[in-house]
Image (spheres, grey):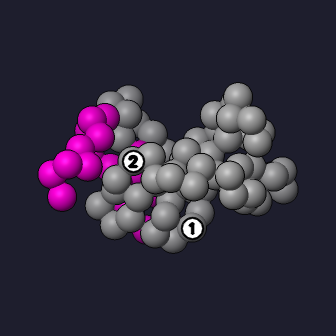
């Protein structure tokens, strides 16, 4: 787990393995505790921010660099 600074100054923890592939870079799951009990959101691997949004379809889009995932399915085999 990689500690990252949250928007309110709290320490959050980023998974070391990418969770979702985006159009520009992968997203990583972020937790609010080091034990992965509370999922906080996503970390953009392209611009290194936590400023993104998840829509009702489960897609993640970065508010800074427009990095976005496709649908919910994780399709690493088709690279
Ligand atoms: Zn971004």
* Residue range highlighted in magenta: 60-79
Residue behind mark 2: 20
- Which quadrant of the view contains residue 71? top left
Residue at image position (46%, 69%) is 46
On the image, the x and y values in percent for residue 33 come to 77, 39
Q: Is residue 15 left or right of residue 18?
A: right
On the image, the x and y values in percent for residue 45 come to 49, 64
Residue most toward the left?
Answer: 78
Q: Which circle marks residue 69 in the picture?
A: none
Residue behind mark 1: 48
Residue at image position (31%, 35%) is 72
Residue at image position (51%, 71%) is 47
How far apart marks 1 and 2 lie (CA) works out to 15 Å
Mark 1 secondary-structure assignment: loop
Residue at image position (38%, 64%) is 25
Main SS class of the magenta portion in the image? loop
For the residue pair 28 and 57, the one nearer the viewer reads as 28
Q: Would residue 53 be seen by someone viewing this image from the given angle?
A: yes
On the image, the x and y values in percent for residue 64 come to 49, 66
Mark 2 secondary-structure assignment: strand
Mark 1 residue CB less than 8 A from any atom of ligand 1: yes
On the image, the x and y values in percent for residue 21 come to 34, 53
Q: Quadrant of the C terminus?
A: bottom left
Mark 1 surroundings: few (<14), some (14-19) or many (≥20) residues within 10 A: few
């Amino acid at each position: 787990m990689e500690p990252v600074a949250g928007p309110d100054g709290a320490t959050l923890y980023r998974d070391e393995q990418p969770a979702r592939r985006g159009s520009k870079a992968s997203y990583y799951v972020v937790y609010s505790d080091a034990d992965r009990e509370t999922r906080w959101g996503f970390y953009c691997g392209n611009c290194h921010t936590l400023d993104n949004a998840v829509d009702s379809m489960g897609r993640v889009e970065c508010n800074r660099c427009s990095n976005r995932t496709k649908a919910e399915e994780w399709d690493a085999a088709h690279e």
